[in-house]
Image (cartoon, rainbow, N blue to C red):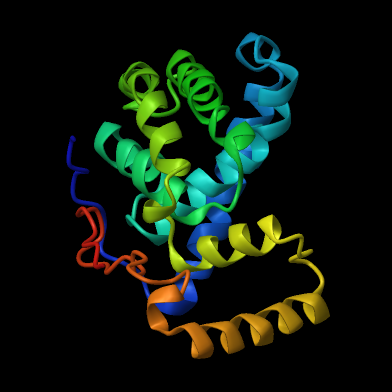
Amino acid sequence: MMKPKKGKPRPSAQSEEQMLDNCLSLVISQWGEGFCASSYFKNLSDEEREEYEGIAFFFTEMMINYLGFTPQQWDEGSMEECCVYLFPEKISEGPEFFRCIVPVLSAFFSYLEEQNLQQHAGAMACDIKNLNESIMERSSDFDNWGMAKRFVMTARADGIDVTDAKAVRTYIEAYNRKVLKDGPDSSMFKDAPHDLVIGRPGKKPARKR
């Protein structure tokens, strides 16, 4: 796997929020407006067009928050890290979402390349076409899911509406009683990947299990 290049020094906590807002504004509002009016967007399927904004949002957010890359700094290595590892680990969605990632981002990067908006866009548009199998495999493998995703996906599978705070509290209480009874090896969180440990921005983050 290609390693992301070194990014810029991470800003203070207060300016990080503003930086994320600025990155999302650039990608969703500025670049996205042109993309949605382009043939690249129109040639996507209905499902892919529906998932576009969520994919663009998550991609932008994770690239800056976990890898330290602004949209202007995106490159092939950081793109692969985000799509193949961060997305499957952290996004609590089913295969219908993950199968849209490659066509959506490939079209988006191709648009950015055509408009000369991002220097690595052409290479990313090419490279991401080779990642679909890895994305689909890792996103469907419970062992690759982070703790938050494990909880959400398991609760949904058990019929819990995760937007219902009362139902979630009741579910957690029942789950905790079950683990106390059956022991820690019965926990859904056993051997879950821990949150990424961020070193210098732009470096591949360390993963702990």
Nearest the viewer among 137 and 120 is: 137
Residue 201 appears at what percent x and percent y? 25, 60
Task: Give residue 4's quadrant in the image.
Answer: top left
The residue closer to the viewer here, 205 or 21, is 205
Comparing 159 with 209, the one in front is 159
Q: Is residue 74 visible?
A: no
Residue 206 in sight here: yes
Count how many numbered circles sit on residues in the image: 0
Q: Is residue 128 above or below residue 139?
A: above
Identify the image quadrant of the N terminus: top left
Up-down relation of residue 29 to residue 127 (above or below): below
Q: Residue at x 71, y 78 (%)?
A: 171
Q: Quadrant of residue 130?
A: top left
Find residue 158 and report its horizontal and vertical position in percent.
70, 61
The residue sitting at 43% across, 20% down in the picture is 116
Quarter of the image with the C terminus is bottom left
Q: Is residue 73 above or below residue 91?
A: above
Q: Going 67% across and 55% down the picture, which residue do you hit?
A: 157
Q: Looking at this view, name the residue that lies furthest to the front.
A: 182
x, y percent for residue 40: 60, 13
From the viewer's perspective, is 120 left or right of 171? left
From the top left corner, tell me how far across and down residue 105 is, in percent: 50, 27
Residue 167's quadrant in the figure? bottom right
Q: Is residue 145 above or below residue 176?
A: above
Q: Is residue 129 left or right of residue 158?
A: left
In the image: residue 58, left or right of residue 159 = left
